[in-house]
Amino acid sequence: MDKVLRLLGMRYATAALMLVAVAALYGAATFSRPGEASGQGRAAPVTHAVVVCPGHEGGRLAVQSLPRKGTGRVDMTPTKGGPPFASMTASGQAWGEDTKSGEDSYTLRATGALAAGLEAEQTTHWGAGPDRGLAGARCAVPGTDLWFMSPGPVSADELDLYLTNVDAQPASVDLSALSGEGPLDTAEGLATPVAPYTTRVVKLGDSAEGLGDIVKSAADLTLRVRTTSGRVAASLRARIGEKKGIEWLPQSGGPATSVLVPGVPGGDGQRRLLVSVPGDADARIKVQVITSGGAFAPQGQDVLDAPAKTVTSVPLTGALSGKAAAVRLVADRPVLAGFAATRGADIAYGTATAPLAAAGSGVVADNRFDSSLVLTAPYGAAAVQVTTVNAAGRSGPQEVRVPAGRTVETELTPPGTDPKDGTAFGAVITVKPGSAPVYASRTLAKGKGDGYLFTILPIMPAATTVHLPDTADSQTALTPG
């Protein structure tokens, strides 16, 4: 019996010692940690940036950096490798150069102060020939989940998706699409490989990687580009038809229940609103048009019922009466939105964007030809300062005021040169402190009447900071993973 009691006592003593040890360890962790996370995180300046210009067909490559304190560098190189063909080392600098057709895509890598708010564009102008048109593309940031709203093969002779891998690891891409008739479900377009430091051109509707024959009946498309490994930069080019216009499609933001599409151009031609519902439930959407005359619901189009997993086209020509405008949508389900505009011999597309907030900036790199800003302030009176920049210097800031619930259009002119000489110049749009948010786009045009060519660039907030989440101690740090 004594042996039994001693054995039980040792077991209870061992268990008690283990409890004391765990309690002591837990207490040490509790009292030594700096505290719980606030949940707010902090903002840090952007010091590294990578963007890809699709190249291949040639065109004007233009780069604009924000005027900021500090040092940095931007190197422009062919994606496939090789020494830089151009570099920038001064903040606030503008650079532009024509590239030849048939060359590789271009990767821009920025460090230091020049990485914050860096903007690069590729614009292509064909004044004659089968590809007659003016097209512009914002050079793309690599990502893992990307969206486009575009014409389908019924509306375009060619749809070419440029996928670029800027990293040393291979990437794998899955494509999916929605049309006016519903989702285009197919196993084609899945697991498309993109080798390191290469650009792969996928022809939508003309290849298995481009979703195959199922896409050919679509008049409008919502295209989703997702990677299952790695990341890619994506650019989408549409050739509508011989002498009917070309365009690079702007990349759309993700689905949201409240979106605003800026920069619907004024003038002649047709205007269509494009709305996509990627979810499984139908969406009810309130539509509001904002012009220079104010905000209003289009007659008979104030509420739009859009089916799930489809793209819906809504005519806007009559409601706009030739005025430049923005379109605001508030939905009970997440949606994507954009527009298609035709004028003269060309076509252009726009998409919903985030606003430029107070003291924030937007940057446009290439403003040769006739260039104008379309600014909308849906929530309150706004004011911006516009500064243009080229190799000769910079202009004095021009203040542009936008009344609450109005859209204003203003021309851009380069500093110290003839605005009609075709010299590339950049523009920096800065929202003044205390201003309401501003939605912005840039229209670039050349020619008149039936020879009018144009392209539209939605202006995004300049990426100058990155949000870093809070860190906090965790009990998982006390146990092996």
Image (spheres, rainbow, N blue to C red):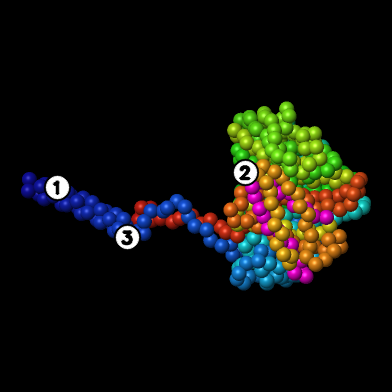
Residue 114 higher or lower than 358, as above or below:
below
Give left or right: position of 307 versus 423: left
Specify the segment rendered in magenta: 370-393
Residue 384 magenta = yes
Q: Secondary structure at mark 3?
A: helix
Along the viewing direction, whichever of 44 and 195 lies nearer the viewer: 44
* Mark 2, other Cα within 10 Å: few <14 / some 14–19 / many ≥20: few
Callout 2 secondary element: loop
Of residue 458 and residue 317, the one placed in the foreground of this image is 317
Residue under pointer 2: 379
Give the numbered dot on residue 32: 3
Mark 2, mark 1: which one is toward the viewer?
A: 2
Residue 93, x across and y down, in percent: 71, 68
At horizontal 32% and vertical 57% (from top left) the residue drawn is: 29
Relative to 77, residue 184 above or below: above
Q: Nearer the viewer, residue 280 or 455?
A: 455
User: Residue 455, can we see it?
Assistant: yes
